[in-house]
Image: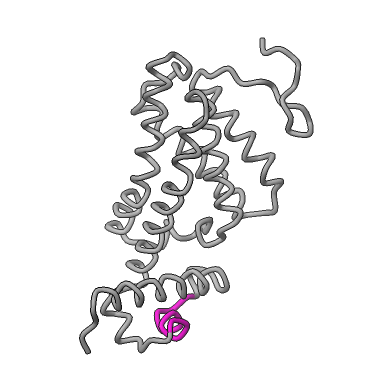
Amino acid sequence: MTYSPDDRDEVRRRVLVAWEEAVTADGYGQVTLAAVAKRAGLARSSLYRYFPSKEALYLAHLEDRVAGVVAAVRDDVLAQRGAPARLRRLLVGEMRQFTQSPELALSDVPDLVSREGRQRLMQCFAPLRHLVREILEQGRADGSLPALDIDKALPVVFACIDVFREHLAGQPVERDVIADDVADFVLRGLGARVPVRGAAGRPSRIPRR
């Protein structure tokens, strides 16, 4: 059977939606391509034409989700005044995606993918890395994020997000408070002036020493 480009796009969309539903319900380790095909209303052989393996489907879904998140938040992030405010908005928004999308917060996935898959996993986050780099370049240029050069700062930012992801996957947390705490930690590490926060998560009036 020959599909038109529009048909192929629609089938791909259905498969990715089915994948997200299946992973959210059962977890990455338990999902099978047969189960995804059934949810999408396809024969398993038809699904293989689009995604030859579970890993390929996982990575395609992640790539789509990251690109969609960055496209959705980019204008809002860049509308903030100054690099620290922009980075905070991006960090908190990204971490809240993990609370709203369990399939993006699975701690077991990186251990299950192949070496080639891990390389592509990094590529999936390229749009996010480009936006973070853009903000860091502004902060270095105007002196508001002076502590680290950009190539050293990038892995720090993403390592902190990853710690949040693993903590979220492991136990219930006060998500908004922890997202703010992680953002504060990153910004201070990059040399930004960040107000001390009170117990309720609001900026404190106590001056920073």
Q: Is residue 191 above or below residue 43?
A: above
The secondary structure that dominates the magenta segment is helix
Residue at coordinates 31% horizontally, 59% vertically from top-left?
117
In percent of width and height, residue 28 lies at 48, 68
Q: How many marks?
A: 0
Task: Determine whether, in the image, residue 18 is placed left or right of residue 8.
Answer: right
The vertical placement of 111 against 189, above or below, is: below
Check the picture and name the quadrant holding the N terminus.
bottom left
Q: Residue at x 39, y 18 (%)?
A: 140
How does the figure colour the protein chain or chains? Answer: one colour
Which part of the image, by quadrant, shows the C terminus?
Answer: top right
Place of residue 89 in the rendered image (x, y in percent of width and height, measured from the top left): 55, 36
Q: Residue furthest left?
A: 2
Q: Residue furthest top?
A: 209
Q: Is residue 84 magenta?
A: no
Q: Residue at x 39, y 37 (%)?
A: 131
Direction from residue 194 to residue 129 in the image, left or right: left
Between 100 and 28, the one nearer to me in the picture:
100
Would you place residue 113 above or below residue 75 in this image?
A: below
Left or right: where 149 falls relative to 183: left
Q: Which residues are magenta?
A: 31-40
- The residue drawn where x is 55% and y is 49% is 165
Q: Position of residue 64 (x, y in %)?
A: 38, 59
Q: Choose between 175 and 163: the one closer to the eye.
A: 175
Residue 195 in the image, given as x and y percentages of width and height: 66, 20
